[in-house]
Amino acid sequence: MYTHEDLARLQAQSLKMQGWIRQQTFSPENEKTLRRFSSWELGELILKVNQSTLRGKLAADPSLPQGLVEEDGRQRWFTLDEINEIRRRLRINRQSLLPARPAGKRALRAAIANFKGGAGKSTVALHFAHAAALDGYRVLTVDFDPQATLSHSMGLSDVAEEFTVWGIMARDLTRETERMNSSARGAQSGTALPQRKLPASITEMGLADLRLADFIKPTSWPTIDIVPSCANAAFVEFASAQYRHLNPEWSFFAAVSRFLDQLPADSYDLIIFDCPPAIGYQSMNAVFAADLLYIPSGPGYWEYDSTTSFIGQLSEALEDLSRFSGIVPAGTFSLPKAFLDVRFLLTRFEPNNDLHRAMQDAFGKVFGDRMAEHPIELTRAVEQSGRFLSSIYEIDYRQMTRETWRRARLSFDRAYEEFRTHALNAWDQMGGEA
């Protein structure tokens, strides 16, 4: 017989192992740090500039970051901050190296969602965030998944649950209830509207007084921040059901959208959501706040079957939200919910696997031009990066053969570049922000 005490004992044992793994993965201070990038990577893979041209530009202007030089003098190594300074100050053939960004618009929001576990949501979210940062974009990631894989991969641990999406939703409940009660008191109708009451267990948590910045944490990447998750936030689905009972008129699905609407439009360029493997209160917040919906799936039949079920259930859930039409506060998305774009992406794809190729063909026939052209391939380097809670961009190519590393990076580069194209097209469709 196993009780909650036995499960707690097993968790304690696992936490000890988790600490040991972090010590092997992160720095001795148990803090994840970002490596430097070589001049070869800077020229060929990041800025996409001829290396001799880049060396000449750096030599001609000593005020530009020069990086750390290897003992043999053959290679220089740059921090991401140094890379971004070079990107801002350098022009090649009179062309800026800064990434494209529509003027006067808020950050584009992309949800990586599918309720099939193991579909690669966290892997895709992590790699797209890191690729976008190397591209020069400022990125905010939001971890909606209580498994907290993205948060751990970003180097965050020991996160208090009040600073997760649950805290954002509880804060929103308090504020929205206060707004509704204020509107009821101010009504000019002859009949007083009933006041909505929240228990002290919610109102006295102090979440309503938290600032936006309290929920946003820095990562080891200087241009990536995160709203983290943690295992203790797994109760958010139960708590949210209770909150809806306390205030049935609370538009729970718009809580994160309202939170993001309060951020200055130029705080970030791209906001990426890592969604949980289920349709629930957290995932509905993610898809409602998203401009672009990216649906990853493995290349097997059962994963195709699960993806089919996901889009059907998501359709029904979004239809159910239409009853809130007209009462969602201004500034958030309107109902019925409409995405600027929806895409499907195959993950863990093996190009020499006949079944995988057959399923890729089936996906393409069903979803047509909604299907991403470049799947994410399964390689040894990708498996290794997963074991060490890192993206392929964080792994030093000297830890394996350069060809193995390049092949894995090329797969993610192609997937990201396709994502960036769709994101920029969606961004152009988006209205400007006041």
Image (cartoon, rainbow, N blue to C red):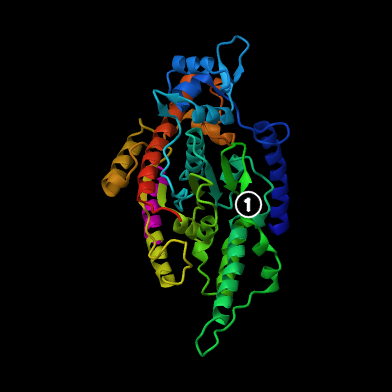
Q: Is residue 312 magenta?
A: yes
Q: Is residue 128 visible?
A: yes
What residue occupies the far top of the structure in this picture? Answer: 72
Image coordinates of residue 90 in percent, x first then y, are 48, 25
Image coordinates of residue 138 in percent, x first then y, are 52, 41
Q: Nearer the viewer, residue 115 or 258?
A: 258
| Magenta residues (range) | 296-313
Q: Is residue 343 visible?
A: no
Image coordinates of residue 97 in percent, x first then y, are 44, 30
Q: Residue at x 47, y 22 (%)?
A: 43
Magenta span: chief secondary structure = helix
Q: Nearer the viewer, residue 36 or 57?
A: 57
Determine whether 175 is above or below 66 in the image. Answer: below
Rendering quarter of residue 171: bottom right
Determine whether 109 is above or below 372 in the image. Answer: below
Which quadrant holds the N terminus? bottom right
User: Disc count in the image?
Assistant: 1
What residue occupies the far bottom of the structure in this picture? Answer: 190
Residue named by callout 1: 213
Q: Nearer the viewer, residue 23 or 343?
A: 343
Image coordinates of residue 85 in percent, x first then y, are 55, 29
